[in-house]
Amino acid sequence: MKNIVLLGAPGAGKGTQAALIREEFHIPHISTGDILRRNIKEGTPLGVTAKKYIDAGELVPDDVVIGLVELRLKEDDCKDGYILDGFPRTIPQAESLDKVARIDVALNIDVPFDVIMERMSGRRVCACGETYHVSTLGDATTCQKCGKELFIRDDDRPETVENRLRVYEKQTAPLIDYYRKQGKLKDVNAVGEIDKIFEDVKKALI
Ligand code: AMP
């Protein structure tokens, strides 16, 4: 299988598509956001550093995330391919990645700005990692998989969302051109049904 990078604004649905790719192709889903949140929960030194940035909607410094991704890619389960979700997020991160890995494809999960705002403001998450949207939850306030109470990520609050989108435009969107120039970019129009989007994702990965 391939070494895949998922690009796209926060709230575009990278995590959802990454989980589907993992199930279909049996390759690990490496989300830097998930790794950082786990560290925050466990109170590790990395978590303490990361929390300040995440809560402000800023990016965690490059050297911190680059170090943790390099370590993760050395693990045995990455030898037959992997999906990077939320990394790289800056040009220096992409350049560091190119020194230690051979990326085959960069999937750009493409969603218009107004849809992103709507999705992020309605996102509800569970500690187990499941993600929901208020439009499909009805009156439910607990996770359909594990039963725990759902909550709003601190960085999904409106003031933080705006900053995250500004940071995305400035620091992460240039990666689209970076991978296009390398001939690795595939665009997927990611508005609509999750399963239909996944069909397009699979076509782009063949
Ligand atoms: P995510 O779950 O991918 O939206 O990430 C949540 C937050 O974690 C981001 O807003 C950043 O503060 C931080 N983060 C995740 N991945 C990276 C990265 N590759 N570089 C810098 N910060 C990151």
Image (spheres, rainbow, N blue to C red):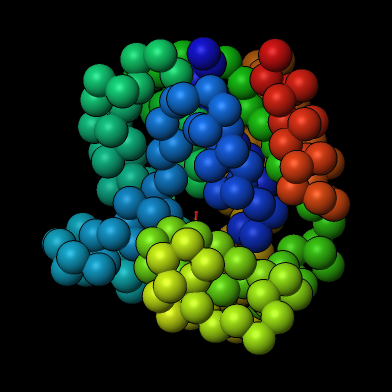
Location of residue 96 (image quadrant): top left
The location of residue 175, given as percent across then percent down, is 63, 37
The residue drawn where x is 44% and y is 37% is 29
Task: Estimate the x, y position of residue 45 in percent, counting from the top left.
Answer: 14, 62
Residue 182, given in percent of the width and then of the height, sits at 65, 16
Residue 204: give x, y in percent of width and height. 74, 22
Q: Visible in this render: residue 102?
A: yes
Image point 61% across, 67% down: which residue?
132
Q: Which corner quadrant holds the C terminus?
A: top right
In this rendering, position of residue 31 left or right of residue 166: left
Q: How many marks?
A: 0
Using the rendered image of the protein, determine whether residue 74 is visible from the camera's viewpoint: no
- Tell me the residue at 69%/54% (across/down): 12
Q: Residue furthest bottom?
A: 139
Using the image, determine if residue 71 lies above or below residue 100. below
Which quarter is ligand 1 in?
Answer: bottom left
Left or right side of 181 for 102: left
Task: Say above or below: 38 vs 67.
Answer: below
Front position in the image: 155 or 93: 155
Rendered image quadrant of residue 72: top left
Instruction: In the rendered view, tell whether residue 129 sits above or below residue 85.
Output: below
Residue at (71% x, 25% y) in the render: 202
Left or right side of 23 for 66: left
Q: Quadrant of residue 117?
A: bottom right
